């Protein structure tokens, strides 16, 4: 394992989802052009190495911290000039974070806190700006004609020690408005919406308060003049007593919105308060006691109150987007929120419940695009268990309906991509999944499904990138860490395997405690325990999964993998032989790529199964012709 001290530069496109939503083809073309004509040559000129591209972002390393900062300054100044004749709402603008730190180098990639700090610094940088750590500022000193503005100590997410952050000013260069760079317009406001507290007596109403929070975040994220902390980050504070100033420091924001929701029968009470993180003062507070049917109006009023308090001028298309509700039927909305909660479980009983919720939402509002996408999501996922239960045609019809109602609905493209992949249409599947990621890089399902797609192609490096993103987007996701673990095993990365196995066990155990009737966390946790060599617990967890749902195909398959890893080879082969007649084409493909079965691949019984699969596939191919 190689370690080295290096300068890490992390950059991403500001408002990428909004740009893609407004003009997908134009945005993709503009980003590619900027990269080819300007960004890549600039990095080469400053002796940098592009480590990887991550959706709308890039990670670059430099052996010289001076070169890293000079490169960042050249990029931001160059992008300013390239945007001179571009309408403000169509500009491709970047934010950059730079840190000097220790990294682990493996197979051309870099890992460790050094990378994490750079990424967090990028997240708090201003549009067109550069945020750097004190270590960067100290090393550069006065070598470059740049000014480092002290932004104080910050507690960055998942970074144990506080980091002193500096923002770079570019001296007296002129921008497109004829103003000096140090006289740029005021910085973009930043806000974090903390999870609204469920004040109902029923803990089962959590889905409703969470849904309200997520929808307010979604609406605020549509505003180009406002940086909104992502849902996955703020939800790590759910259920914890927090101090507003500390949270604001950790997230690097100016303002905090917090509130509560009480839903009783057909009435709802929502409170909200906007807090200035600098002094803890309340800029705005209100309470809404309304009929449940007013829920959409309340969300709009909260959004507009924040916009007015922060004196943000909305673009016409932003105003329209905020006031355009996915549905006006509150009962349909409630069913949709409940379905979304069940969907995240990724086990057959909950998926079936989720599908019922989404179907009821469609029945109540036949023009509810998100609900159609939810049905397609459920049916695609349920094909993991019983492929004949829902046809690919049914899924494509549901997702096509969602796309017809809302062409920019990333969820619909993601579920469509998964269904096509399961049916062997990989070229079309890739297009749909990449379209979903382009529309919403932060959509959990798009990242997770694309990770699975790449895994099935044998592209374990690529799969890990998207599984990591999925795991970051949902802190309760125990599936992605298990998939990263398997991918790491295939690549021979023992340290990464153990790291992600422990994360998978921790998350699976939490999920199992919350829903002890759910077999999913049990059999996936068993896999992680087997990888760590904890044989007794692995067997107990596998047995618990089968006791909960003895006929669950995925639970039985993962139990076979546990047996394989623990040396119980005959039990593994017996289980697989019993499963094969009931397995889908997709499950068999997974079986062929899964490194967890490597310990039994040389057994004659295993080879016989592979031969039988090949014969069946050949017969199906002839039948198709």
Image (cartoon, rainbow, N blue to C red):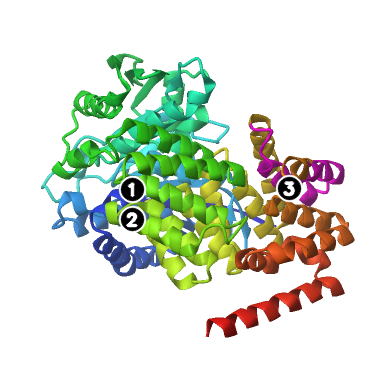
Report the quarter where the N terminus lies.
bottom right
Mark drawn on residue 401: 2
Q: What element does badge 2 sit on?
A: helix
- Mark 1 or mark 3, whichever is nearer to me: 1
Q: Which residues are magenta?
A: 515-543
> Residue at left 25%, top 56%?
79
Mark 1 → mark 3, Cα distance in angstroms: 37 Å
Residue 381 makes an appearance in the image: yes
- Mark 2 or mark 3, whichever is nearer to me: 2
**Residue 531: in magenta span:** yes
Mark 2 → mark 3, Cα distance in angstroms: 39 Å
**Which residue in the structure is indicated by mark 1?**
369
Residue 24 vs residue 526: left or right? left
**Which residue in the structure is indicated by mark 3?**
528
Nearest the viewer among 580 and 432 is 580
Horizontal and vertical percent for residue 356? Answer: 48, 42
Asked whether the residues under the numbered discs 2 and 1 touch, taking CB atoms below 8 Å apart as contact, a structural biologist would say: yes
**86 versus 314 height, above or below:** below
Residue 296 vs residue 63: left or right? left
Mark drawn on residue 202: none
> Residue at left 54%, top 58%?
451
Residue 452 vs residue 217: left or right? right
Mark 2 → mark 1, Cα distance in angstroms: 7 Å
């Amino acid at each position: 394992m190689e370690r080295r001290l290096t300068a890490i530069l992390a950059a991403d496109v500001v408002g990428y989802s909004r740009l893609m939503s407004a003009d997908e083809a134009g945005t993709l073309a503009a980003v590619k052009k900027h990269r080819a004509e300007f960004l890549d040559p600039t990095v080469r000129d400053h002796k940098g190495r592009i480590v990887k591209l991550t959706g709308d972002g890039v990670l670059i390393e430099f052996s010289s911290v001076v070169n890293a900062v000079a490169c960042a300054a050249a990029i931001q100044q160059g992008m300013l000039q390239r945007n001179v004749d571009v309408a403000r709402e169509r500009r491709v603008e970047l934010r950059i974070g730079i840190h000097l730190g220790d990294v682990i180098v493996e197979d051309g990639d870099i890992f460790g806190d050094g990378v994490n700090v750079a990424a967090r610094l990028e997240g708090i940088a201003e549009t067109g700006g550069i945020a750097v750590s004190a270590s960067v500022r100290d090393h550069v000193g006065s070598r470059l004609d740049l000014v480092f503005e002290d932004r104080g100590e910050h507690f960055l997410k998942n970074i144990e020690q506080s980091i002193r952050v500096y923002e770079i000013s570019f001296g007296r260069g002129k921008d497109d408005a004829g103003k000096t760079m140090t006289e740029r317009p005021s910085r973009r406001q930043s806000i974090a919406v903390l999870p609204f507290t469920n004040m109902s007596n029923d803990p089962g109403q959590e889905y409703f308060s969470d849904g309200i929070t997520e929808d307010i975040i979604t609406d605020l994220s549509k505003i180009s003049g406002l940086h909104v902390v992502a849902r996955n980050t703020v939800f790590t504070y759910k259920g914890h007593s927090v101090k507003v100033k500390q949270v604001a420091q950790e997230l690097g924001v100016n303002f905090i919105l917090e509130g509560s929701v009480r839903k009783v029968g057909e009435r709802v009470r929502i409170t909200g308060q906007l807090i200035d993180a600098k002094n803890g003062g309340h800029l705005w507070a209100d309470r809404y006691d309304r009929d449940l049917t007013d829920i959409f109006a309340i969300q709009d009023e909260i959004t507009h109150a924040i916009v007015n308090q922060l004196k943000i001028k909305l673009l016409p298309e932003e105003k329209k987007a905020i006031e355009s509700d996915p549905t006006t039927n509150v009962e349909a909305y409630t069913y949709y929120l409940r379905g979304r909660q069940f969907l995240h479980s990724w086990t057959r009983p909950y998926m079936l419940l989720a599908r019922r919720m989404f179907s009821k939402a469609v029945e109540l509002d036949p023009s509810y695009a998100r609900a159609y996408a939810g049905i397609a999501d459920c049916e695609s996922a349920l094909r993991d268990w019983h492929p004949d239960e829902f046809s690919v045609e049914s899924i494509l019809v549901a997702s096509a309906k969602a796309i017809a109602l809302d062409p920019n609905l990333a969820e619909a493209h993601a579920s469509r991509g998964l269904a096509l992949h399961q049916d062997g249409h990989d070229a079309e599947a890739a297009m749909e999944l990449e379209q979903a990621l382009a529309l919403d890089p932060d959509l959990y399902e798009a990242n997770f499904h694309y990770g699975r797609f790449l895994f099935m192609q044998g592209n374990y490096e690529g799969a890990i990138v998207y599984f990591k993103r999925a795991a970051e987007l949902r802190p309760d996701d125990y599936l992605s860490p298990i998939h990263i673990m398997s991918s790491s095993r295939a690549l021979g990365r023992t340290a990464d395997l153990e790291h992600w196995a422990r994360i998978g066990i921790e998350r699976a155990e939490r999920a199992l405690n919350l829903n002890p009737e759910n077999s999913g966390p049990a059999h996936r946790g068993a896999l992680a325990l087997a990888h760590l060599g904890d044989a007794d617990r692995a067997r107990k967890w596998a047995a618990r999964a089968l006791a909960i749902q003895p006929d669950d195909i995925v639970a039985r398959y993962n139990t076979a993998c546990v047996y394989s890893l623990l040396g119980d080879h005959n039990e593994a082969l017996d289980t697989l032989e019993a499963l094969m007649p009931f397995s889908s084409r997709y499950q068999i493909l997974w079986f062929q790529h899964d490194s967890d079965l490597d310990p039994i691949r040389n057994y004659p019984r295993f080879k016989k199964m592979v031969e039988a699969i090949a014969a069946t596939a050949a017969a199906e191919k002839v039948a198709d012709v």
